[in-house]
Image (cartoon, rainbow, N blue to C red):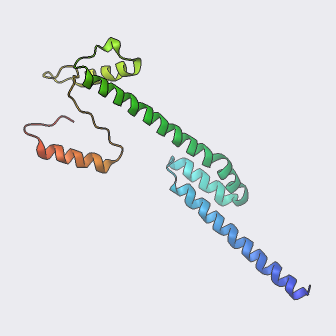
Amino acid sequence: MDASVVRFIVRYGVLLLLGLFILQLISTVLAILSERREPSATLAWLMVVVFFPVGGIILYYALARGRFHRHYRKREQNLRKVQATLSSCVERCRADSAVPSSELPAVERGLVKLAEKSSDLPDTGPPFAGNVVEQYSHGAAKFGALMDAIRSARSHIHL
């Protein structure tokens, strides 16, 4: 091979690798910023990736990325368990007009105690069949339903 061809390959090969590395660095920084985590953890990972680019990128993808997604999946699974428990409790309460607390599983007994303690108004008793509980995971849906409830209220609203 000619010396000029070798210099061309070396020069532009190095520039190509440098460009790919910078692109990877930028994409890693954007991935760190896009994840929902504590601000201090985000700042720490950004500092590691910026000050130690090669090792920081490897550490981030090896350690933090998988752990964050495992935590998020576990949180989603726990939320689904709670929703399933609440749904079964609501269905059971709809089927029976009055279910004694002693017949409920421990988790549902705790939910009933929480509902009884939170209804501290004098004219309200313990929860009974026919009540409706809606769970919202996004603010837009919650506030939309809240505004509909306010518009359709006759005398007052309990929040």
Q: Eyeballing the image, is 29 above or below 151?
A: below
- Whole-percent x and y of residue 155? 7, 37
> Relative to 49, is 120 on the left or the right?
left
Q: Eyeballing the image, is 67 above or below 16?
A: above
Q: Eyeballing the image, is 153 above or below 22?
A: above
Total labels drawn: 0
- Whole-percent x and y of residue 57? 68, 56
- Whole-percent x and y of residue 120? 21, 23
> Relative to 60, is 11 on the left or the right?
right
- Whole-percent x and y of residue 126? 22, 20
Of all residues, the one furthest to the left in this rendering is: 154
Of all residues, the one furthest to the top in this rendering is: 102
Determine the residue positioned at 87% across, 82% down. 6
Determine the residue positioned at 70% across, 54% down. 58
> Relative to 143, is 103 on the left or the right?
right
* Screen quadrant of the N terminus: bottom right
Determine the residue positioned at 64% across, 68% down. 23
Q: Eyeballing the image, is 10 above or below 56?
A: below
Of all residues, the one furthest to the front in this rendering is: 95
Determine the residue positioned at 61% across, 59% down. 28
Would you identify the image quadrant in which residue 159 lies? top left
Would you identify the image quadrant in which residue 83 lies? top left
